[in-house]
């Protein structure tokens, strides 16, 4: 008889536990709103890469966590990234004025199109390090502002 009473109680405890775990896992993601300013014009697209580690950020052969290509409509572009798991990220972005899906550079390898990074960090010669551009994302929403360098 005790087993018959304990079985429903055990099932209720298991159900409530799994419900709490499921609800907690749903809370472990949020929305980033990225505002990109200092666009030279409204030609082309904004190309954004959200990277969750150094390899995604620096290696061309490693796909970023999420990429966005958005047509430019105004002087400031807003990109909304939904369902992003909490963690550490870095963003790199550029204004693809001629719609060729790459950051054009001159013969000295200096970018000819606007570009920027999370934290509005500025690099010296070469690629900017992940550690300088990374930020912690651990809330339901976050607003990130990036001002392009032209």
Image: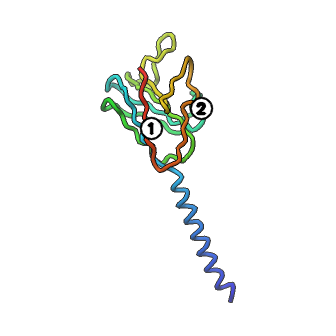
What residue is pinned by disc 1?
144
Q: Is residue 41 left or right of residue 65?
A: left
* Picture layout, residue 7 above or below residue 18: below
Which quarter of the rendered picture does the C terminus lie within?
Answer: top left
* Picture layout, residue 110 above or below residue 130: above
Going 32% across and 29% down the picture, which residue do you hit?
Answer: 75
Which one is nearer the viewer's eye here, 25 or 47? 25
Residue 104 picture location, percent across and down: 45, 19
- Please tell me how crowded label 2 is: few (under 14), some (14-19), or many (20+) other residues with Cα within 10 Å: few
Point out the tag, 2 or 1, that comes first from the N-terminus: 2
Residue 147 picture location, percent across and down: 42, 28
* Spatial separation of the CA atoms under disc 2 and disc 1: 17 Å
What residue is pinned by disc 2?
131
- Please tell me how crowded label 1 is: few (under 14), some (14-19), or many (20+) other residues with Cα within 10 Å: some
Going 65% across and 80% down the picture, which residue do you hit?
Answer: 7
Going 42% across and 35% down the picture, which residue do you hit?
Answer: 145
């Amino acid at each position: 008889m005790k087993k018959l009473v304990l079985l429903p109680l055990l099932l209720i405890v298991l159900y409530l536990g799994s419900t709490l775990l499921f609800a907690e896992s749903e809370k472990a993601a949020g929305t980033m709103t990225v505002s990109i300013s200092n666009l030279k014009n409204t030609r082309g697209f904004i190309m954004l890469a959200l990277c969750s580690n150094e390899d995604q950020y620096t290696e061309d052969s490693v796909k970023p966590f999420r990429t966005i290509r958005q047509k430019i409509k105004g002087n400031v572009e807003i990109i909304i990234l939904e369902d992003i798991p909490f963690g550490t990220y870095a963003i790199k972005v550029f204004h693809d004025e001629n719609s060729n899906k790459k950051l054009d550079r001159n013969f000295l390898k200096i970018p000819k199109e606007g570009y920027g990074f999370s934290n509005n960090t500025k690099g010296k010669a070469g690629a900017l390090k992940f550690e300088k551009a990374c930020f912690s994302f651990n809330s339901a929403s976050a607003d990130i502002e990036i001002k392009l360098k032209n």
